[in-house]
Image (cartoon, rainbow, N blue to C red):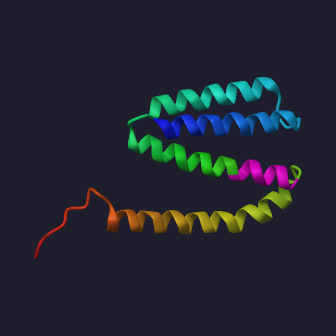
């Protein structure tokens, strides 16, 4: 619950900066913050949805970062995003393997 609060505060700062730079309008910033808050509330306590939300937020943040860095040039964004997508897939696979090995739900035998 406290982590959600910090996440919302971080989103407020991030969308505030995007608004201050003129990248998005105040309506988009407000709707994004309200939508994010509602999604966090709905997914609270649901691990599957929460993990999906976390992955989607990382991909969305990466896309926004690339769009801002490359000034909206789709060719340059694609050239940078393709290698990063490969790295993200490898990291997700590594996460799944480590969660399977060291996860709490794994039943251990005392042989």
Name the residue rendered at 47%, 68% in the picture.
94
- Quadrant occupied by the C terminus: bottom left
Q: Is residue 39 left or right of residue 87?
A: left
Name the residue rendered at 84%, 55% in the picture.
69
Q: Residue furthest bottom?
A: 111
**Residue 50 image offset from top left, x and y in percent:** 46, 42
Q: Is residue 53 left or right of residue 98?
A: right
Predominant secondary structure in magenta?
A: helix
Name the residue rendered at 60%, 34% in the picture.
8
Closer-to-camera residue (52/107): 107
Whether residue 50 is situated above or below residue 110 in the rendered picture: above
**Residue 73 image offset from top left, x and y in percent:** 88, 53
Q: Which residues are magenta?
A: 62-70
Snapshot quadrant of residue 57? top right
**Residue 97 image offset from top left, x and y in percent:** 40, 68
Closer-to-camera residue (2/22): 2
């Amino acid at each position: 619950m406290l982590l959600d609060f910090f996440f919302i505060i971080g989103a407020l700062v991030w969308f505030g900066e995007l608004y201050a730079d003129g990248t998005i309008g105040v309506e988009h910033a407000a709707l994004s913050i309200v939508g994010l808050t509602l999604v966090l509330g709905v997914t609270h306590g649901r691990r599957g949805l929460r993990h999906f939300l976390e992955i989607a937020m990382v991909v969305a943040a990466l896309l926004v970062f690339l769009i801002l860095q490359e000034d909206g040039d789709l060719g340059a964004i694609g050239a940078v995003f393709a290698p990063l997508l490969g790295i993200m897939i490898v990291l997700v696979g590594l996460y799944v393997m480590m969660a399977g090995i060291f996860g709490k739900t794994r039943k251990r035998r005392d042989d």
